[in-house]
Amino acid sequence: MARVNSGELVQLSPLVRRLTANNPSMLAGAGTNCYLIGDKELAILDPGPADSSHIQAILNAVGDTAVRWIVVTHTHPDHSPAAKILAERTGAALVGAVLPNDEQQDASFVADRDIHHGDLIEGEGFTLEAMATPGHVSNHFCYLLREEGAVFTGDHIMEGSTVVIVPPAGDMADYLQSLSILKNYSLQSLLPGHGDAMLNPIEVIDGLIAHRLQREGKVVDALRSMGAASTIDALVSVVYSDVDPSLHPIAKVSLWAHLLKLEKDGRARKEGEVGGWDFSRQYWFWKESL
């Protein structure tokens, strides 16, 4: 496992270079990975935040090569705000799926081409195939570079950690299904939005599915053992007993996603609604106890 460094430009393959933005954080690792795809002409994928030094670094890496597309996996603020600026500088078309009326999204991104599952972005010497992968958020897409069997996974799969599923736009049931869908493709590597390349894609995907189902099992056990009604605030310390308590505020969001999946499956029921991410007035019941 190689170390990923903010601001570093790395040639990963004949068709792919990675430039990591200087926006490190607990969740983003060294920063958001921007990928330059192609040789004679380029697609820029997930250009990252609207940071002037990062944008200039992308332009320096591009040089005189024509940029035809700027593609985003999703419109969270660490992935897409640089897209509009780069499009204005290069004349490239903006490609992605917009999720309107969601305050967690980057409102500056307006697609010239609204992407759909199975759509192709065909450049000179490369083809990207769009794969709808809702879960982390409902407008998330991964992209398969057909020539190399490499999948740009955005925040669907990150190296070294699990992604946060953020309801209501995020959905745990969708996430698990989207992971399974990736296994239908001939994959050689996973190129994530955060972290280093992974060369054992099926093993990684199977591990993520197993981990999420194991966590779901802990949610079920906690609901059964904690009595008639439980709040997310009470459940999180039991379900995420293996996670540093300082991360529990973030874990509550994925716990909420697990509970919503169980509700969708007819295995749990809630009373009360969440106002924002205030979970204290929402109560969850295990269906078998009703």
Image: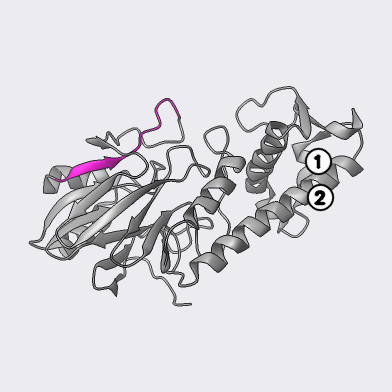
Whether tag 2 and tag 1 are in contact, CB under 8 A, the answer is yes
Q: Is residue 96 magenta?
A: yes
Question: Helix or strand or loop: what does disc 1 sit on?
Answer: helix
Q: Quadrant of residue 268?
A: top right
Q: Is residue 216 above or below residue 18?
A: above
Q: Which residues are magenta?
A: 92-102
Question: Helix or strand or loop: what does disc 2 sit on?
Answer: helix
Q: Is residue 19 magenta?
A: no
Q: Which residue is mark 1?
A: 234
Q: Nearer the viewer, residue 92 or 104?
A: 92
User: At x 60% / y 29%, what residue is drawn?
Assistant: 276
User: At x 73% / y 48%, what residue is drawn?
Assistant: 216
Q: Type of residue at label 1?
A: Ala
Report the Cα–Cα distance between label 2 and label 1: 8 Å
Q: Is residue 244 above or below residue 267?
A: below
Residue 197 position in % (x across, y down): 42, 69
Q: Please indicate, yes or no, whether residue 84 appears anywhere in the rendered image.
A: no
Magenta highlight: main SS: loop
Q: Type of residue at label 2?
A: Val
Residue 214 position in % (x across, y down): 73, 55
Q: Which residue is mark 2?
A: 238
Residue that sits furthest to the bottom in the current view: 2
With 38 as the anchor, is 79 left or right in this view?
right
Mark 2 crowd level (few <14, some 14–19, many ≥20, 10 Å Cα): some
Q: How many numbered discs sit on the rendered protein? A: 2
Task: Identify the disc placed on residue 113.
Answer: none
Residue that sits furthest to the left in the current view: 64
User: At x 72% / y 32%, what residue is drawn?
Assistant: 263
Q: Quadrant of residue 98?
A: top left
